[in-house]
Image (cartoon, rainbow, N blue to C red):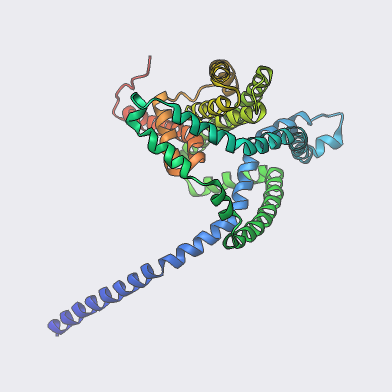
């Protein structure tokens, strides 16, 4: 009886193992469909995620304005100060957009169109310049003749015809439909962000009560402390980088206009946008602006422009940016370069922009872990001098 039971258990084990293997195979086989469902759901959530980011960025100005509206003499304003604070912030944003569309956009559009129309001339000038370079110097080692030949074989007309081909008409229609979806998503982002800002206190209280319910007291305190430090780093870094980029862009555009640089407004705004990306952004922007200025104003003008932009960037990095940022993130330049490089390699421009604050958070987490472990072992933590 015992032997038969043992045999039955063995065969039951084999049967169960086989059944589990079949189920696992079927699940893996259908995994692509599961990923598609998850991907579709994430696409639906994108407007809400963006709305959360917008509300996060606007939380501090809304809070400051709400405190300013806390006036005893104006009871109606005091009673509805939260709603008025949100309304005020979005009204300011609307004014900024109005100024950009009516005063800055026409100049940028004109510069872009003029630059696009002159591209063939700059293209021909580049070819002529490359042909005049001596072949018995450094340039001969990089096969300058082959570079010129490959440039000459590049047919702009064929590229333009490809753009307007019948095969791409369907893509253009899809683009129009996508634009409509973008407008709808933008509407959802604005509405949801407004509701998040209006109900931000209730949301914070809900998260707080949830954390206290599922976490121990010490764990909750650590999470709260980490959140406050994380929030401080992210908000200060993101807001200061955007503000700093705007200031640098305006200063550069004004200086370039005074110098008589062609496409000064366009180049200034480009430098301001690239300046948001640590280290690499400023270098790439200066290189692009210098190349364009060489074709539009000559080598000497480009040299003076480059010198002036570098001076403006040095003033920004040593005076303006530290003032805006306040307390430094205390991140080594080596870590900044590493974080920017890795972030850009895996996540593109957003990764280059957010790599530094993420690196700062990882550094805080690691240092806290080291300090906590060393305190348990009663080892003195070495501080930088």
Q: Quadrant of residue 272?
A: top right
**Residue at screen point 37% across, 17% down:** 384
In the rendered view, tell whether residue 353 sits above or below residue 34: above
Could you tell me which quadrant the C terminus lies in? top left
Does residue 257 sit above or below 31 in this rendering? above
Give the residue displayed 42% in from the left and 29% down from the top: 337
Residue 145, picture quadrant? top left
x and y, in percent, of residue 176 in the image: 66, 57
Quarter holding the N terminus is: bottom left
Above or below 273: residue 32? below
Q: Residue at x 72, y 44 (%)?
A: 198
Is residue 216 visible to the viewer in this orientation of the structure?
no
Q: Nearer the viewer, residue 363 or 13?
A: 363
Horizontal side of 102 relative to 132 (left or right) equals right
| Lateral position of residue 14 relative to residue 34, left or right | left
- Numbered circles on residues, count: 0
- Residue 135 horizontal/vertical position (percent): 36, 27
Residue 109 quadrant: top right
x then y, percent, for residue 10? 18, 77
Between 130 and 267, the one nearer to me in the picture: 130
Q: Is residue 68 left or right of residue 179?
A: right
Could one spot residue 154 in this view of the protein?
Answer: yes
State the residue lying farthest toward the left.
3
Residue 35, horizontal then vertical, whole percent: 46, 62
């Amino acid at each position: 009886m015992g032997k038969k039971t043992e045999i039955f258990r063995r065969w039951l084990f084999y049967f169960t193992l086989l059944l589990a293997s079949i189920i696992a195979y079927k699940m893996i086989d259908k995994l692509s469909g599961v990923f598609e469902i998850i991907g579709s759901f994430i696409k639906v959530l994108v407007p809400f995620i963006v709305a959360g980011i917008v509300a996060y960025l606007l939380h501090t100005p809304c809070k400051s304005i709400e405190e300013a509206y806390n006036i005893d003499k104006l009871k109606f304003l005091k009673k509805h100060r939260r709603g008025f604070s949100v309304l005020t912030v979005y009204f300011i944003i609307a004014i900024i957009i109005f100024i950009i569309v009516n005063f800055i956009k026409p100049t940028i559009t004109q510069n872009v169109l003029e630059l696009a129309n002159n591209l063939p001339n700059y293209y021909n000038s580049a070819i002529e310049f490359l042909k005049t370079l001596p072949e018995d110097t450094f340039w001969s080692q990089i096969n300058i003749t082959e570079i010129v030949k490959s440039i000459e074989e590049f047919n702009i007309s064929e590229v333009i015809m490809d753009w307007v081909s019948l095969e791409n008409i369907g893509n253009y229609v899809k683009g129009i439909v996508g634009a409509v979806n973008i407008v709808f998503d933008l509407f959802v982002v604005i509405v949801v962000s407004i509701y998040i800002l209006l109900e931000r206190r209730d949301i914070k209280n809900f998260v707080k009560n949830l954390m206290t319910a599922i976490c121990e007291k010490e764990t909750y305190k650590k999470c709260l402390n980490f959140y406050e430090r994380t929030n401080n780093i992210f908000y200060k870094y993101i807001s200061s980088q955007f503000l700093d980029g705007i200031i640098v862009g305006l200063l550069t555009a004004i200086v370039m206009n005074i110098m008589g640089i062609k496409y000064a407004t366009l180049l200034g705004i480009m430098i301001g946008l690239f300046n948001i990306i640590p280290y690499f952004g400023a270098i790439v922007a200066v290189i692009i602006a210098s190349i364009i200025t060489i074709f539009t104003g000559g080598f000497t003008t480009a040299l003076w422009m480059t010198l002036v932009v570098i001076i403006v960037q040095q003033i920004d990095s040593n005076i303006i940016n530290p003032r805006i940022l306040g307390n430094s993130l205390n991140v080594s330049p080596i870590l900044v370069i590493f974080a920017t490089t890795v972030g850009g390699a895996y996540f593109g421009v957003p990764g280059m922009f957010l790599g530094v604050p993420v690196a700062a958070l990882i550094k805080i987490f690691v240092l806290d872990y080291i300090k906590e472990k060393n305190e348990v072992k009663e080892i003195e933590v070495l501080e930088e001098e």
